[in-house]
Image: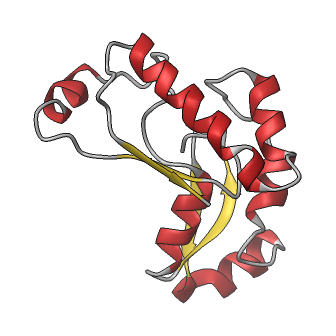
Amino acid sequence: IAYHIPPPFKFSVQHHTRFSAEWLSEYQVEKFNPVSGCSLSLAVSRLRTYGYQLFRLTYLDAVFVHESIAEIVEQHYEVSLPQDEFLCYRRSRLWLQMDIGYVREWFFSQHPSSAIGNIWDNITYVTEQLGRPQAPFSLYY
């Protein structure tokens, strides 16, 4: 999960016919790479269509539970599923790969439309710094 893209923004890296195989071969989870994966909001949205519900966030990832076992998980962990992605995000200790000041500004903006341009510019800048100026991604809310 790309935690530096806060809710409600939906971000994902897209496939590039010419470069994706090379980028994948160079990928290292421990290496700074804020333009990989997808945002929490995108994961919640996409996985919901397959019956998965947000359970919790970990340091590097999110845990989802299928609706077929949600009741068991709710009883065992004394939680109500699905968990609210905004509350989970706000209460978690996350590994951010962007400046915390930027991420706070984006998360607490009055409206997503006032922050989406800044997010786009920062992602574009980072892809250029990583030598991937042509790296395609999607970003919306």
Residue at (24%, 45%) from the top-left corner?
Answer: 15
Q: x and y percent of residue 43 in the render?
A: 52, 60
Residue located farthest toward the left when viewing the structure as drawn:
18
Q: Is residue 137 above or below residue 49?
A: above
Q: x and y percent of residue 18 in the render?
A: 10, 33
Residue at (65%, 45%) from the top-left corner?
Answer: 116
Applied colour scheme: secondary structure
Q: Nearer the viewer, residue 63 or 22?
A: 22
Residue at (75%, 33%) from the top-left corner?
Answer: 103
Q: Quadrant of residue 88?
A: bottom right
Q: x and y percent of residue 124 in the render?
A: 47, 27
Q: Nearer the viewer, residue 123 or 47?
A: 123
Q: How many marks?
A: 0
Is residue 76 something one can see in this rendering?
A: yes
Q: Is residue 114 above or below residue 75?
A: above
Left or right of 96 in this view: 12: left
Q: Is residue 79 above or below residue 100?
A: below
Q: Quadrant of the N terminus?
A: top right
Q: Quadrant of the C terminus?
A: bottom right
